[in-house]
């Protein structure tokens, strides 16, 4: 944590289905910051690939994807009703579509492609130029914003993460299998942690948050305590 600067860049990294987005959104709401879901950007690319047959028969056509990079237009637009930024692909709101099981199945493979990561990291750094943002993902504190003012690394037990994801998708009316979701989470953990480019790992100066047995309210109390203590130490 850096001291003496409260126009912060807050970087939140961690494993899939740890509740990073919920946590980050709530921090942004309380602090009146902008929330950026970096994972949504990789999900948007994955959706683009599925729609344009760059992924066929469970195989990614890397050559075709590289040629299509210039055609991928991802934006975040503010929804005044939900008071949240939502993900757009070619001017279409895809916030719900990118949360599908099919997208989840391929997003880790898409995100480890060097050209994709380079394009996304560049876009993410531009978003952070004005500070006062909360961004979550896999490599925010290690690669995108290595000098972020506050870094959190979130973890939770795989079974708990699978249960959370299962309930979330059921509430959205999706027909899913708990076993399929748990398998997907374990596979994504392995891919994210072992890829050669920007692997998921804890930054040396990040604070670990294990939220396996914590409510959202308890997590917010925890993080706000950290921010308040930071201010006290500087006063």
Image (tube, rainbow, N blue to C red):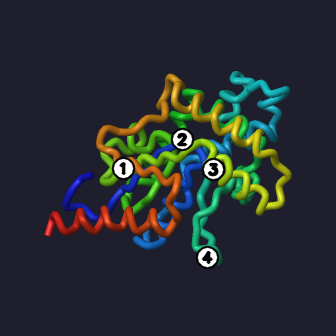
Instruction: Give the Cα separation between the discs numbered 4 and 1.
Output: 28 Å
Instruction: Give the Cα separation between the discs numbered 1 and 3.
Output: 25 Å
Relative to 196, residue 34 above or below: below
Instruction: Give the Cα separation between the discs numbered 1 and 2.
Output: 20 Å
- State left or right for residue 188 relative to residue 133: right
Crowd class of label 2 (few under 14; some 14 to 19; many from 20; radius 10 Å):
many
Query: Which tag, 3 or 4, sits closer to the chain's start?
Result: 3
Q: Nearer the viewer, mark 1 or mark 2?
A: 1
| Extreme residue in the left direction | 235
Q: Are marks 1 and 3 in contact (CB under 8 Å)?
A: no
Which picture quadrant has residue 53?
top right
Residue 153 shows in this picture: yes
Residue at 42 percent of width and 51 percent of height: 209
Figure quadrant of the C terminus: bottom left
The residue labelled by disc 2 is 120
Which picture quadrant has residue 233?
bottom left
Residue at 65 percent of width and 77 percent of height: 81
The residue labelled by disc 4 is 80
Query: Which tag, 2 or 3, sits closer to the chain's start?
Result: 3
Residue at 72 percent of width and 59 percent of height: 93
Secondary structure type for disc 3: strand
Query: Which tag, 4 or 1, sits closer to the chain's start?
Result: 4
Secondary structure type for disc 4: loop
Q: Position of residue 139 (x, y in %)?
A: 46, 39
The residue labelled by disc 1 is 151
Q: Position of residue 28 (x, y in %)?
A: 46, 66
Relative to 65, residue 12 above or below: below
Instruction: Give the Cα separation between the discs numbered 3 and 4.
Output: 19 Å
Residue closest to the eye, 101 or 61: 101
Instruction: Give the Cα separation between the discs numbered 2 and 4.
Output: 25 Å
Crowd class of label 1 (few under 14; some 14 to 19; many from 20; radius 10 Å):
many
Task: Give me the disc on residue 131.
Answer: none
């Amino acid at each position: 944590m850096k001291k003496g600067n409260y126009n912060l860049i807050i970087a939140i990294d961690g494993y899939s289905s740890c509740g990073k987005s919920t946590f980050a959104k709530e921090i942004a709401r309380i602090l009146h910051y902008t929330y950026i879901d970096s994972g949504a950007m990789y999900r948007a690319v994955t959706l683009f690939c599925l729609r344009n047959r760059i992924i066929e028969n469970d195989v990614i056509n890397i050559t075709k994807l590289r040629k299509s990079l210039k055609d991928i237009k991802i934006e975040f637009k503010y929804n005044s009703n939900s008071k949240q930024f939502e993900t757009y692909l070619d001017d279409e709101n895809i916030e719900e579509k990118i949360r599908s099981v099919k997208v989840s199945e391929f997003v880790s493979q898409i995100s480890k492609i060097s050209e994709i990561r380079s394009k996304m990291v560049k876009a993410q750094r531009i978003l952070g130029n004005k500070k006062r943002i909360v961004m979550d993902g896999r490599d925010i504190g290690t690669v995108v914003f290595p000098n972020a003012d506050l870094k959190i690394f979130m973890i939770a037990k795989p079974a708990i993460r699978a249960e959370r994801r299962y309930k979330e998708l059921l509430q959205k009316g999706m027909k899913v299998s708990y076993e399929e979701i748990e398998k997907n989470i374990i596979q994504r953990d392995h891919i994210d942690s072992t890829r050669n480019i920007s692997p998921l790992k804890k930054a040396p100066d990040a604070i670990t948050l294990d939220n396996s047995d914590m409510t959202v309210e308890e997590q917010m109390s925890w993080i706000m305590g950290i921010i308040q203590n930071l201010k006290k130490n500087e006063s």
